[in-house]
């Protein structure tokens, strides 16, 4: 009886919990960022990426867990934004 009362009391709380919205399954990737063979790619605009676009910076995505990510961040002054679709997204200042 006690367990049933507890369950009934917690049931309204369970209705308030909403699952996180799913992230994109793909990104609008363009050519290599620093050169054509670069694994980091410039990212285009879509419904997901438009929230990260900046007129003074490039939106760049590198494969998640890329071995030389620290070098990329140091060389480009990149600022990490989020992870999506197997990539880590960065804002790289142009100025």
Image (cartoon, rainbow, N blue to C red):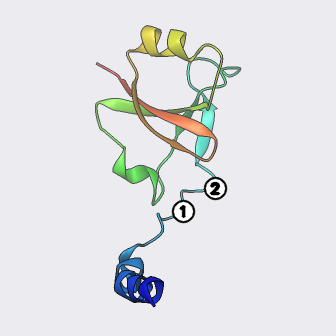
At x 63% / y 32%, what residue is drawn? 31
Where residue 92 appears, as percent x and y from the top left, is 39, 25
Tag 2, which secondary structure?
loop
Name the side, left or right, on which 90 lies relative to 66: left
The answer to whether the residue labelled 2 contacts the one labelled 1, judged by CB atoms less than 8 Å apart, is: yes
Q: Secondary structure at mark 1?
A: loop
Q: Position of residue 89 (x, y in %)?
A: 49, 36
Which residue is disc 1 drawn over? 22
Name the mark on residue 25: 2
Q: Nearer the viewer, residue 90 or 93?
A: 90
Which dot marks residue 77? none
Q: Nearer the viewer, residue 72 or 57?
A: 72
Residue at 54 percent across and 62 percent down: it is: 22
Image quadrant of residue 30? top right
Q: Quadrant of residue 37?
A: top right
Look at 59% across and 37% down and name the residue there.
87
């Amino acid at each position: 009886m006690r367990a049933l009362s507890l369950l009934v009391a917690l049931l309204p709380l369970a209705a308030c919990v909403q699952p996180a919205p799913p992230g994109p399954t793909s990104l609008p990737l363009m050519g290599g960022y620093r050169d054509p063979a670069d694994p980091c790619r410039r990212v285009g605009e879509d419904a997901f990426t438009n929230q990260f676009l900046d007129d003074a910076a490039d939106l760049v995505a590198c494969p998640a867990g890329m071995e030389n990510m620290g070098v990329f961040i140091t060389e480009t002054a990149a600022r990490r934004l989020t992870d999506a679709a197997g990539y880590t997204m960065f804002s790289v200042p142009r100025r």
